[in-house]
Image (cartoon, helix red, strand yellow):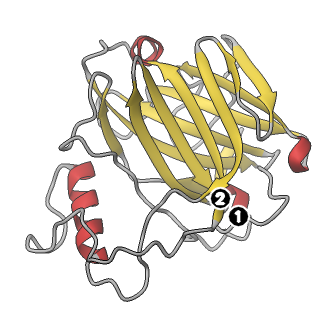
């Protein structure tokens, strides 16, 4: 069983399969280097992105902040997108990604979206149902899905130093994701101060991107394609 010895999770995000809610913005949340066990950077979740693409939903997780040349995923890790139809913090369906081998020659395997075999802090690989596989740093397809897992420039735009509006942006993001006010009501904006600078420009991460038919997500959750669901991302390793 996989447990949370090296467990990462991002903030719960909100999405309707038909449209992205919260004023049409994309929900994302940072979780950078927040654990005493973050020395295994390829298990350290940076950000989660969930958005619509035509008849599909795209799930993207980034890990390994400031990834260097030759960075690869953890072959002992279980990388998961967890989906919840009731907003109770218990996953009703998961998309699981695992890696075989080391270095840039890794093989990628994707399972789901399917009901998890266990719920709570522990996780097991999904054994039933089909899976698809491909190579590290290459696009591959199967079961209506398109997958990429490999290095990419960090897409998270943030001015870390000297930008007083950072607090406002984070307040607004958490308020939108949680559905309840967070922080000073006068500090709520999705616009950085002008000029907006990206302090992460040129920094690389490892990205897992899974594009899934909306119908598959709805079927796995037992909802319709116009219903709302909630999503977060985790990594874990075997005990």
Residue visible at 47% across and 13% down in the picture: 216
**Pick the front one: 194 or 25:** 194
- The image shows residue 94, relative to residue 105, as above or below, that is above
Per the image, the residue denoted by label 2 is 205
- The image shows residue 200, relative to residue 60, as above or below, that is below
User: Which label was assigned to residue 127?
Assistant: none
Residue visible at 68% across and 12% down in the picture: 128
Residue visible at 72% across and 48% down in the picture: 237
Residue 5 visible in image: no
Residue 192 in the image, given as x and y percentages of width and height: 28, 71
Residue 193 in the image, given as x and y percentages of width and height: 26, 77
If the image is split into quadrants, where does the N terminus sit?
top right
Q: Nearer the viewer, mark 2 or mark 1?
A: 2
| Occupied quadrant, residue 65 | bottom right
Q: Is residue 227 left or right of residue 159?
A: left
> Local crowd at mark 2 within 10 Å, few (<14), some, or many (≥20)?
many
Choose the circle earlier in sequence order: 2 or 1: 1
- The image shows residue 88, relative to residue 64, as above or below, that is above
Q: Residue furthest front?
A: 195
Q: Is residue 139 left or right of residue 4?
A: right
SS for tag 2? strand
User: Which label was assigned to residue 41?
Assistant: 1
Distance, label 2 to label 1, CA atoms, is 10 Å
> Local crowd at mark 1 within 10 Å, few (<14), some, or many (≥20)?
many
Residue 161 visible in image: yes
Residue 28 in the image, given as x and y percentages of width and height: 39, 52
- The image shows residue 66, relative to residue 153, as above or below, that is below
Residue 105 in the image, given as x and y percentages of width and height: 91, 42
SS for tag 1? helix
**Pick the front one: 236 or 100:** 100
| Occupied quadrant, residue 131 | top right
């Amino acid at each position: 069983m996989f447990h949370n010895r090296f467990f990462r999770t991002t903030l719960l995000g909100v999405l309707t399969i038909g449209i992205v809610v919260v004023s049409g913005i994309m929900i994302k949340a940072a979780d950078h280097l927040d654990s005493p066990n973050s020395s295994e950077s390829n298990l350290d979740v940076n950000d989660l992105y969930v958005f619509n693409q035509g008849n599909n939903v795209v799930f993207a997780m980034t890990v390994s902040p400031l990834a260097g040349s030759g960075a690869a995923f953890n072959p002992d890790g279980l990388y998961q997108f967890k989906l919840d139809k009731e907003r109770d913090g218990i996953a009703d369906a998961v998309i699981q990604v695992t890696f075989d081998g080391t270095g840039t020659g890794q093989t990628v395997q994707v399972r789901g979206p399917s009901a998890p075999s266990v719920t709570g802090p522990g996780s097991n690989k999904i054994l039933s149902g089909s899976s698809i596989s491909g190579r590290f740093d290459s696009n591959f397809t199967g079961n209506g899905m398109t997958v990429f897992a490999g290095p990419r420039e960090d897409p998270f735009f943030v001015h870390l130093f000297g930008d007083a509006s950072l607090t406002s942006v984070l307040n607004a993001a958490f308020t939108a994701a949680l559905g309840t006010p967070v922080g000073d009501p006068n500090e709520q904006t999705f616009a950085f101060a002008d000029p907006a600078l990206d302090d992460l420009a040129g920094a690389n991460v490892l990205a897992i991107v899974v594009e899934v038919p909306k119908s598959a997500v709805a079927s796995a959750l037992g909802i319709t394609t116009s219903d709302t669901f909630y999503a977060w991302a985790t990594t874990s390793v075997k005990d």
